[in-house]
Image (cartoon, rainbow, N blue to C red):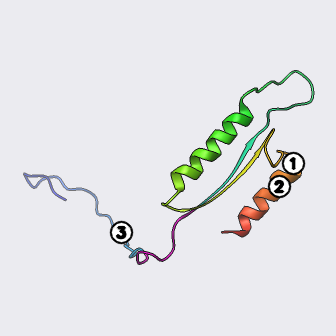
């Protein structure tokens, strides 16, 4: 690309274009592990809204992805179906890795 007067040009650049897959083939996929811990041993740490924030964030990711991509959002939060224990977190990441 040259300027209008013809004395200044941009550096050359090469781009390789790969045609995207035909419509209807593979949808993009979203994998997320959302963790919110609201219950701690001791009283030195008090994150009162972390579990609620995690639930809200997981719901927002599900809603945003609906219709656009396949979503796999795993919620581990205090007071939810799956507790945010170390074992459950490791299991959630292991299962998400298998879905690649």
How many other residues sit within 10 Å of disc 3, few (<14), some (14-19) or many (≥20)? few
The residue furthest top is 44
Q: Does the CB distance between marks 2 and 1 fall below 8 Å?
A: yes
How many other residues sit within 10 Å of disc 2, few (<14), some (14-19) or many (≥20)? few
Would you name the residue on which mark 3 appears?
15
Name the residue at 87% across, 48% down. 86
Name the residue at 82% across, 58% down. 91
Left or right for 54, reference 7: right
Q: Nearer the viewer, residue 12 or 72?
A: 72
How many other residues sit within 10 Å of disc 1, few (<14), some (14-19) or many (≥20)? few
Would you name the residue on which mark 2 appears?
90
Spatial separation of the CA atoms under disc 2 and disc 3: 40 Å
* 72 shown above or below 24: above
Name the residue at 20% across, 56% down. 9
Element type where label 2 sits in the image: helix
Q: Nearer the viewer, residue 18 or 54?
A: 54
Nearer to us: label 2 or label 3: 2
Percent across and percent down for residue 31 are 64, 58
Left or right for 99, reference 38: left
Ranked by sequence position, the earlier of labels 2 and 3 is: 3
Nearer to us: label 1 or label 3: 1
Left or right for 27, reference 8: right
Percent across and percent down for residue 49 are 71, 29
Spatial separation of the CA atoms under disc 1 and disc 3: 44 Å
Question: Which residues are drawn in magenta?
Answer: 21-29
Element type where label 1 sits in the image: helix
Would you name the residue on which mark 1 appears?
86
Q: Main secondary structure of the magenta part?
A: loop
């Amino acid at each position: 690309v040259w300027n209008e007067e013809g004395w200044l040009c941009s550096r050359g650049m090469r781009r390789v274009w790969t045609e995207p897959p035909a419509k209807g083939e593979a949808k993009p996929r979203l994998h997320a592990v959302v963790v919110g811990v609201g219950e701690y041993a001791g009283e030195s740490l008090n994150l009162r809204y972390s579990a609620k924030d995690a639930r809200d964030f997981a719901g927002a990711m599900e809603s945003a992805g609906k219709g656009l991509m396949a979503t796999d959002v795993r919620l581990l939060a205090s007071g939810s179906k799956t507790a945010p224990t170390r074992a459950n977190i490791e299991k959630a990441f292991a299962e998400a890795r298998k879905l690649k």
